[in-house]
């Protein structure tokens, strides 16, 4: 696991920066109008460009987080990560990436 982003909650949005080996970009999570029950609760934008989506989930312990899919033309494939609130700094969030194992 690696922290690839830091975010703050501002109203209904989450704003911050994603940093990987190939990209550093300011990103905003904005609430999304869901077209279906499986549609994302948030869309991720770098400026006006949509770069991902996020769904509300709960951990086994009942703690809420956002399950995210982020894509960029420089990536070989989309990356999957979780936006979780920092326990020590309420109102701040970390975007945590972990490689999905092959099924």
Image (cartoon, grey):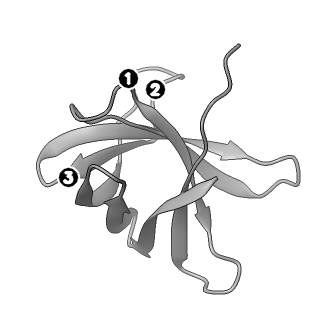
Which image quadrant is residue 47 in? bottom left
Badges 1 and 2: C-beta atoms under 8 Å apart? yes
Instruction: Report how far apart the C-alphas of labels 1 and 3 lie in the structure.
Output: 22 Å
Q: Position of residue 45 (x, y in %)?
A: 24, 49
Q: Position of residue 3 (x, y in %)?
A: 54, 62
- Residue underneath mark 2: 39
For residue 77, side relative to residue 100 (left or right): left
Q: Is residue 33 above or below residue 64?
A: above
> Closer to the observer: label 1 or label 3?
3
Label 1 environment density (alpha carbons within 10 Å; few <14, some 14–19, many ≥20):
few
In this rendered view, identify the residue nearer to me: 79 or 42.
79
Instruction: Report how far apart the C-alphas of labels 1 and 2 lie in the structure.
Output: 6 Å
Decide which of tag 3 and tag 2 comes sooner along the chain.
2
For residue 1, side relative to residue 14 (left or right): right
The residue tagged with tag 2: helix, strand or loop? loop
Q: Position of residue 69 (x, y in %)?
A: 45, 36
> Closer to the observer: label 3 or label 2?
3
The residue tagged with tag 1: helix, strand or loop? loop
Give the label on residue 91, or none: none
Decide which of tag 1 and tag 3 comes sooner along the chain.
1
Label 2 environment density (alpha carbons within 10 Å; few <14, some 14–19, many ≥20):
few
**Residue that sits furthest to the front in the current view:** 21
For residue 41, side relative to residue 2 (left or right): left
Q: If the image is split into quadrants, where does the C terminus sit?
A: top right
Instruction: Report how far apart the C-alphas of labels 3 and 2 lie in the structure.
Output: 20 Å
Give the label on residue 46, or none: 3
Give the label on residue 35, or none: 1
In this rendered view, identify the residue nearer to me: 75 or 87.
75
Q: Residue at x 11, y 48 (%)?
A: 48
Q: Residue at x 34, y 26 (%)?
A: 76
Q: Residue at x 34, y 38 (%)?
A: 52
The residue tagged with tag 3: helix, strand or loop? strand
């Amino acid at each position: 696991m690696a922290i690839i982003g830091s975010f703050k909650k501002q109203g209904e949005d989450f704003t911050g920066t994603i940093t990987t080996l190939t990209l550093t970009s300011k990103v905003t999570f904005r609430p999304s109008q869901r077209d279906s029950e499986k549609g994302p609760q948030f869309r991720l934008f770098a400026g006006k460009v949509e770069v991902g989506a996020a769904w509300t989930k709960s951990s086994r312990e009942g703690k809420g987080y956002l399950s995210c899919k982020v894509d960029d033309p420089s990536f070989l494939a989309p990356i999957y990560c979780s936006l979780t609130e920092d326990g020590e700094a309420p109102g701040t969030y970390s975007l945590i990436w972990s490689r999905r194992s092959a099924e």
